[in-house]
Amino acid sequence: MLRPLFLTRASIGLAATAVEGAVALPGRAAGAAAALPGLPVKLAGSVLQAYLHAGQTLTELAVRGDAVLGAVFPARSDQPEWATFDEDLDTHDSGPGGESAGGPDVPTGRVTPRDS
């Protein structure tokens, strides 16, 4: 599946969050009236929190957008014919004596002392 742009996924996640917030709004209206005296402190804290967590929130919205898109367009599980991965290739053949198939001059990643 071709992934849409990051901002598109974030916008879809924001729309899903807005719908959930609108559904919960009537129950929150009564609680908001009781919290009116502490509003300035809460507002300042909310602004600071929004500033510090803007990147995290945007990423969470993109993940939520991915979930919505994944539900609408399920991912394909088959591997494309043109794709090749290192695990598919058998390049780790060992020759006699544990040396690689390329011979003794091929680097193996081991450090051995030189004979002086």
Image (spheres, grey):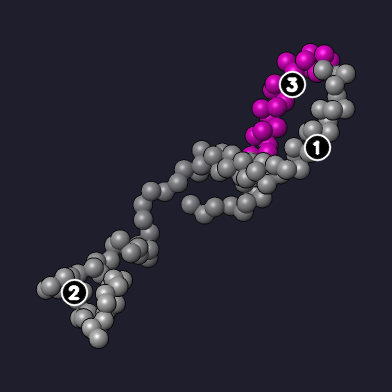
Q: Which residue is mark 3?
A: 25
Q: Which of 44/109 is in front? A: 109
The mark lying in front, picked from 2 and 1, is 2
The one of 66 and 100 positioned closer to us in this rendering: 100
Residue occupied by mark 2: 99
Look at the image and tell me whether residue 65 can be seen.
no
Tell me the CA gap for discs 2 and 1. 63 Å
* Left or right side of 9 for 76: left
Residue linked to disc 1: 47
Indicate which label's residue lies in the foreground, 1 or 3. 1
- Name which residue type carries label 3: Leu
Residue 69: name its quadrant: top right
Q: Which residues are magenta?
A: 12-34
Instruction: Indicate the position of residue 76 as horizontal and vertical percent values.
Output: 42, 48
State whether the magenta stretch is mostly helix, strand or loop.
Answer: helix
Could you tell me which secondary element the residue under label 1 belongs to?
A: helix
Residue at (25% x, 69% y) in the render: 91
* SS label for mark 2: loop
Residue type, mark 2 in image: Glu
| Measured Cα–Cα span from mark 3 to mark 2 | 70 Å
Give the residue type that dot 1 points to: Val
Q: Is residue 115 visible?
A: yes
Answer whether residue 113 is magenta in the image.
Answer: no
The image shows residue 38, relative to residue 103, as above or below, that is above
Marks 1 and 2: in contact by CB < 8 Å? no
**Element on which disc 3 rests:** helix
